[in-house]
Image (cartoon, grey):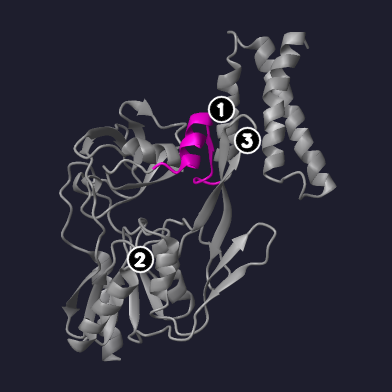
């Protein structure tokens, strides 16, 4: 290897070693795994040498390093991300995001992907759906864009526009959609009597007042004659996980709501306490592919404690927390360090909740008028009627 080649290999390999050390990987694994890790680093060094000596053009060390770091993060989970120096500084300062929003909650799968479009938001009005790929933002590819950066790019001053390039399903051609950012107000729980004896409660997001609102609406429905409740958390990927757990306490009088699992620690139970379980009506929870985060903890707590059955589609699988780990050059890793688990100990993150009764919603193509039919709600009402008759 030439002296120049050794310098490049050292420049790239040293931060990788430091990156690994920061994560605690080498310190907390057995000797055999350490040897395997060093073997991977040696292979990485060989790859860099081959690129340096054989690639047709002069290589850009910074570009290769940036790509390598992104690749390491992408190999973990969608919410873990490598942040460059500028992005890490923004995150560390805790700067508030711009007030204008599109209402898109993002994940990553090769490109940025829509988890859900917030009810009443510009994205929802434009017809964006769970599972849509965001291939570009203002003409720039999202192939190497993290969820953190994608979220920042979609925000801006209210009234300004952002263009997203969307690909749906197996379609060959993407669609460009222009969204006008809005300042979005908190969404309230609302309810109605679906049919005689069955109340319907729509929970579009989980915030600090959601639990009180659910209790209020459920009480009103019960006074109006409801003997059963349908709680709809479809498309709900918004809000803090703790708000979802607080709402679950209304229905679970005793037992474990969920577990927190940090690395190398015993899983920590989140248990019901005295005073929980104020709502005793039988419950059905409606879910879809846009149900994520706090809504998954809520639905999982009720399902796991046999306080509700789930009807609809498998949920997204997003129940974790991240922390910022700074690297020596000022860049950082936004690292998933904690998972939330179901009452039975099963995983939610990247797995999702499996409904007790599966109902698949039809795909709506771009430009197609959505059907007014609601197969998931219809199945829940049918099931509710059968149980009342029994």
Which residue is denoted by mark 3 in the rendering? 327
Tell me if label 1 and label 2 are in contact, CB under 8 Å. Answer: no
Q: What element carries label 3?
A: loop
Locate residue 383: give its quadrant: bottom left
Q: How crowded is mark 3: few (under 14 residues within 10 Å), some or many (20 or more)?
A: some
- Which mark's residue is nearer the viewer, 1 or 2? 2
**Residue 369: percent from the left, percent from the top?**
15, 49
Q: Residue 25 carries which label?
A: none
- Which mark's residue is nearer the viewer, 3 or 1? 3
**Sequence-first disc among 3 and 2:** 2
Q: In this view, does 210 lie above or below 34?
A: below
In the image: residue 136, left or right of residue 50: left
Q: Can residue 289 be seen in this view?
A: yes
Q: Is residue 356 visible?
A: no
Which residue is denoted by mark 2 in the rendering? 208
**Sequence-first disc among 3 and 1:** 1
Q: Which mark is residue 67?
A: 1
Q: How far apart are marks 1 and 2 (CA)?
A: 39 Å
Q: In this view, does 117 lie above or below 188?
A: above
- The reply to whether the magenta stretch includes residue 82 is yes
Locate residue 56: give its quadrant: top right
The magenta stretch is: 77-95
**Residue 245: percent from the left, percent from the top?**
44, 70
* Image quadrant containing the C terminus: bottom left
In the image: residue 76, left or right of residue 181: right
Q: Residues within 10 Å of mark 2 (few under 14, many from 20)?
A: some
Q: How far apart are marks 3 and 1 (CA)?
A: 16 Å
């Amino acid at each position: 290897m030439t002296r120049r080649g050794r310098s490049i290999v050292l420049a790239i390999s040293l931060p990788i070693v430091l990156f690994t050390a920061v994560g605690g990987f080498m310190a907390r694994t057995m000797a055999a795994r350490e040897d395997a890790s060093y073997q991977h680093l040696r292979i990485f060094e060989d790859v860099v040498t081959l690129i340096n000596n054989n690639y047709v053009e002069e290589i850009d060390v910074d570009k290769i390093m940036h790509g390598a770091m992104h690749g390491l993060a992408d190999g973990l989970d969608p919410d873990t991300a490598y942040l460059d120096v500028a992005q890490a500084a923004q995150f560390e300062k805790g700067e508030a995001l711009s007030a204008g929003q599109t209402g898109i909650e993002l994940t990553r799968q090769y490109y940025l992907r829509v988890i859900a479009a917030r009810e009443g938001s510009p994205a929802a009005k434009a017809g964006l759906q769970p599972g849509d790929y965001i291939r570009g933002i203002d003409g720039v590819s999202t192939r190497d864009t993290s969820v953190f950066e994608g979220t920042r790019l979609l925000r801006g001053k209210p009234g300004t526009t952002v263009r997203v390039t969307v690909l749906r399903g197996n379609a060959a051609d993407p669609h460009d959609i222009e969204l006008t950012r809005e300042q979005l107000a908190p969404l309230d729980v609302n309810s109605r009597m679906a049919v005689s004896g069955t109340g319907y409660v729509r929970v579009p997001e989980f915030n600090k007042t959601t639990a009180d609102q659910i209790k209020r609406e459920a009480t009103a429905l019960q006074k109006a004659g409801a003997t059963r409740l349908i709680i709809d958390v479809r498309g709900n990927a918004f809000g803090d996980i703790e708000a979802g757990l607080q709402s679950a306490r209304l229905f679970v009088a005793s037992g474990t709501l969920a577990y927190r699992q940090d690395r190398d620690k015993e899983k920590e139970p989140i248990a019901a306490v005295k005073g929980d379980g104020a709502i005793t009506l039988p419950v059905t929870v409606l879910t879809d592919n846009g149900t994520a985060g706090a809504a998954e903890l809520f639905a999982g707590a009720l399902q796991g404690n046999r306080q509700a059955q789930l009807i609809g589609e498998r949920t997204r699988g997003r129940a974790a927390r991240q922390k910022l780990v700074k690297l020596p050059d000022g860049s950082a890793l936004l690292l998933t360090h904690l998972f939330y688990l179901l009452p039975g100990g099963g995983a939610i993150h990247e797995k999702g909740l499996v409904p007790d009764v599966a109902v698949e919603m039809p795909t709506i193509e771009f430009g197609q008028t959505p059907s007014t039919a609601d197969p998931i709600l219809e199945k829940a009402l049918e099931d509710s009627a059968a149980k009342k008759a029994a």
